[in-house]
Image: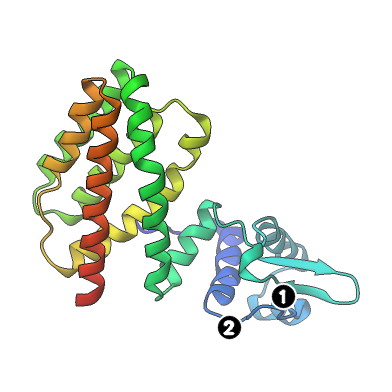
Amino acid sequence: MTEHRPRGLHGQTVEALASRILSDEWGEGTVLDLPALREELDISLTALREALKVLAAKGMIDARQKRGTFVQPREKWNMLDADVMRWQTAAADDPGLLDELTEVRAVVEPAAARIAAGRASEEDVEGLREALADMAAAGDDPEASVQADLAFHRRLMAATHNNFLMRMERVIAIGLAERDKLVHGASPAEDPVPSHRKVFDAIVAGDPTAAEQAMLALVTKSRDDLAKAQRRS
């Protein structure tokens, strides 16, 4: 997956503050010294407050009279926020986070495949076909393989034409990308095309049950591959 680089001073400030929370440098309940932070980061108090507003909107910090600005417990964070998920997967050494994302995939994607089998348009099918072709063409190129895999799963979620499921794409994409990087980095990956083709063929055939079963098998295999990679690493 392409490395994310924050744009501009505002983005860099947000990421710098978030990294301190994610690394536990600032643990739950830590009260932030805003004047000292402003001086350390060499930014205006206005710029610092704007960055803190972003983290507050994500549930990572809060501000109260007489207490000041402080770090919120993790259960208060907006876990479905794209930045929060990206920061956590980039910073965490805990394999449990990827395990949880895999559990979400196992719940969501088979159901999404079932729905897509009954709703996919010609455009959806063509997008899935292109992603499958890109997957086959990627060969031993890990980056190309990851991108093709992400494209297939994103297009699958889009083929549900369900606005709530389509929003889950960010969870699926981040969990899948982190899993792919770990699995590809541990050893040469098996050819992903056959398992994905079974899902594709079932969607094209308009067979919800077969699509659901094929996707469940794919996610189960993905979970097993992740567990093996984690043990090796």
Q: Is residue 232 visible?
A: yes
Locate residue 89, reporting x and y percent: 42, 65
Q: Residues within 10 Å of mark 1 (few under 14, many from 20)?
A: some
**Image position of 185 with respect to 126: above or below:** below
223 or 81, nearer to the observer? 223
Q: Earlier in the sequence, mark 1 or mark 2?
A: 2
Percent coordinates x, y for residue 139 in the rendering: 9, 48
The quarter of the picture where residue 211 lies is top left
Left or right side of 32 for 187? left
Secondary structure type for disc 1: helix
Residue at the disc numbered 1:
38
- Characterize the local packing of mark 2: few (<14), some (14-19) or many (20 or more) Cα atoms within 10 angstroms: few
Q: Amino acid at mark 1?
A: Arg
**Residue at point 19%, 76% (across, down):** 232
Write down the residue under mark 2: 25
Residue 61 is drawn in which quadrant?
bottom right
> Residue at left 49%, top 64%?
87
Q: Amino acid at mark 2?
A: Glu
Question: Could you say where residue 50 lies in the image, as x and y percent from the top left?
Answer: 72, 59
Depth check, front residue: 64 or 195: 195
- Residue under the point 61% across and 56% down: 78
Assign the C terminus to one quadrant of the image. bottom left
* Gap between marks 1 and 2 measured at Cα: 17 Å
Observer able to see residue 1:
no
Q: Residue furthest right?
A: 66
Q: Is 102 left, or right, of 137 in this rendering? A: right
SS at mark 2 in the image: loop
